[in-house]
């Protein structure tokens, strides 16, 4: 995909193309010039835009419900899906060795690239333009959003499902690995599952999501 075509997809043209190039450059390609700082910024901007939207659109709901709804909209699997949806996977710049990584690690890379893109748009075009892009990307999610759902976190849902199936509550084994990442492992019915995240909580949440999607615990 050409960068111009990508800009058409997100409905935003960068005034300074270097911001976009910075956002799609993974640290495996350049340890000194990569998208990690933009990822940090984009994470905060995305959370703020989503929080503002929920606060305005759902004035009768309390903090707990709004927090869970926001978490659902910015969770790792959602951001990875969004990255693939807009074609980030086709323009991200990685080292040749990254092609051999597990899908789970690649998902983490796309999640980070999506956040970096949001950060780059904010630097290039400011808050208003960033909101427009996020609103476009999340249009279907916003249209189908209902806070009548309980928005329980995946770990709670998994624990309830396992107990309902007569299994012991999940016991996550989580350690810090290279690259300031965390790896969480859980064995369910003699099957070992593993996932990584930017924090202990993120790794365990993503692990619970993958197990629920697989359904082998039932």
Image (spheres, rainbow, N blue to C red):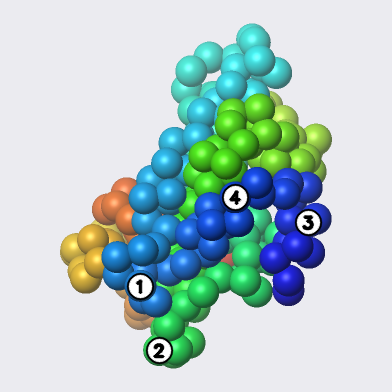
Q: Do residues under tags 4 and 1 come within 8 Å of each other at their CB atoms?
A: no
Secondary element type, mark 2:
helix
Task: Give the distance between the C-alpha atoms of the residues marked 3 and 1, in whole angstroms.
Answer: 27 Å
Q: Nearer the viewer, mark 2 or mark 4?
A: 4
Q: Verify CB contact (< 8 Å) between mark 2 and mark 1.
A: no
**Along the polypeptide, which appears first: circle 2 or circle 4?**
4
Above-or-below relation of 163 to 140: below
Count of labels in the image: 4
Q: Are marks 4 and 3 in contact (CB under 8 Å)?
A: no
- Does residue 171 appear left or right of residue 192 in this picture? left
Q: Nearer the viewer, residue 98 or 155?
A: 98
Asked if residue 212 can be seen in this view, the reply is no
**Residue under label 4:** 16
Q: Nearer the viewer, residue 207 or 1?
A: 1
Camera-side mark, 4 or 1: 4
**Residue of label 2:** 97
Q: Residue at x 39, y 76 (%)?
A: 29
Residue 54 vertical position relative to residue 211 in the rendered view, above or below: above
Q: Which residue is mark 1?
A: 30
Q: CA distance from mark 4 to mark 1?
A: 20 Å
Task: Classify residue 149 by image quadrant.
Answer: top right
Evaluate whether residue 201 shows in this view.
Answer: yes
- Point out which mark residue 9 bears: 3
Nearer to me, 108 or 136: 136
Mark 3 lies on a secondary structure that is helix
Rendering coords of residue 134 (x, y %): 67, 40
Camera-side residue of 6 and 83? 6
* Point 60% across, 17% down: residue: 55
Mark 3 or mark 2, which has the lower sequence index? 3
């Amino acid at each position: 995909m050409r960068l111009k075509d990508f800009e058409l997809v997100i409905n935003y043209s960068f005034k300074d193309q270097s911001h976009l190039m910075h956002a799609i450059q993974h640290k495996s390609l350049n340890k000194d010039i990569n998208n990690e700082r933009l990822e940090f910024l984009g994470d905060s901007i995305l959370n703020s835009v989503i929080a503002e939207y929920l606060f305005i659109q759902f004035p009768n709901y309390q903090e707990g419900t709004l927090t869970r709804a926001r978490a659902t909209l910015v969770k790792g699997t959602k951001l990875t899906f969004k990255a693939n949806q807009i074609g980030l996977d086709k323009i991200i710049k990685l080292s040749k060795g990254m092609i051999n990584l597990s899908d789970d690690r690649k998902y983490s890379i796309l999640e980070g690239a999506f956040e970096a893109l949001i950060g780059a748009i904010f630097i290039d075009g400011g808050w208003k333009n960033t909101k427009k892009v996020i609103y476009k990307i999340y249009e279907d999610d916003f249209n189908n959003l209902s806070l009548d759902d309980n928005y329980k976190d995946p770990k709670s849902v998994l624990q309830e499902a396992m107990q309902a199936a007569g299994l012991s509550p999940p016991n996550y084994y989580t350690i810090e690995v290279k690259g300031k990442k965390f790896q969480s492992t859980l064995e369910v019915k003699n099957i070992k599952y593993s996932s990584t995240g930017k924090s202990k909580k993120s790794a365990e949440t993503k692990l619970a999501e993958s197990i629920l999607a697989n359904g082998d615990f039932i």
